[in-house]
Amino acid sequence: MALWVFGYGSLLWNPGFTPIRQVTARLPDYHRSFCMLSIHHRGTPDDPGLVLALDHQPGAQCTGVALEVDPNEETEVLAMLRERELISSAYYEANVDLICNDGKTITALTYIVDPDHAQYCQFDLEKQAQMIAQAVGGRGPNTEYLFNTATLLTEMGIKDDDMRWLADRVRALTAT
């Protein structure tokens, strides 16, 4: 059985591997949200940033990309993803059923936020923008993460009003 990975945030624009195929797909009952404090990649423990996570919300849906892993690279890709995504226990790994644009269903590996973890958060959009505008972590500025994700979603035709508002607000906050 093929290994598929669901990308909804940085995996959209920086999967860390070359997929042999990718398709637009939706995950029911979850939404993409800046609901995880980033204390490693896009912030620090003293000055956390925010990264996207899949947050459970009945009736919602998150549109992203299902990425098929080359069967010869599955072991390496899994190791790389686990090192990257499970740096803390804020995410857990899960197999989920995605609905592709053609109506077919794909089972894919993804990373879902643990709402009981200390890094889980819920802030209004203005607070999110303020945090993202100034945070920097081991993988670079939090603004880069936001802008790359927002740009790719727009290029893919995926509507995300919160993401668009955040990108516009953070650009205004960081304009010099």
Image (spheres, grey):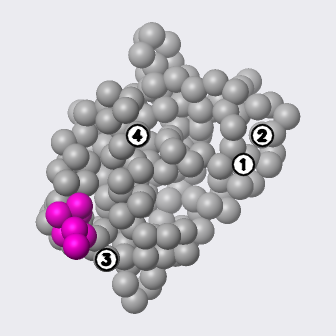
Examine the residues drawn in magenta and state their main secondary structure.
helix
Q: Are marks 3 and 2 in contact (CB under 8 Å)?
A: no
The disc label shown at residue 74, or none? 2
173 horizontally vs 28: left or right:
left
Instruction: Please state the extent of the stretch shown in magenta in the rendering.
Output: 170-176
Q: Which quadrant is home to the N terminus? A: top right
**Can you tell which of label 4 and label 2 is closer to the viewer?**
4
Q: Identify the residue under disc 3.
A: 134
73 horizontally vs 12: left or right:
right
Q: Identify the residue under disc 4.
A: 152
151 horizontally vs 175: left or right:
right
Secondary structure under the numbered disc 3 in the rendered image: helix
Q: Identify the residue under disc 1.
A: 78
Secondary structure under the numbered disc 2 in the rendered image: helix
What amino acid is found at the position of numbered circle 3 in the picture? Gln
User: Residue 41's x, y, as percent?
Assistant: 51, 70
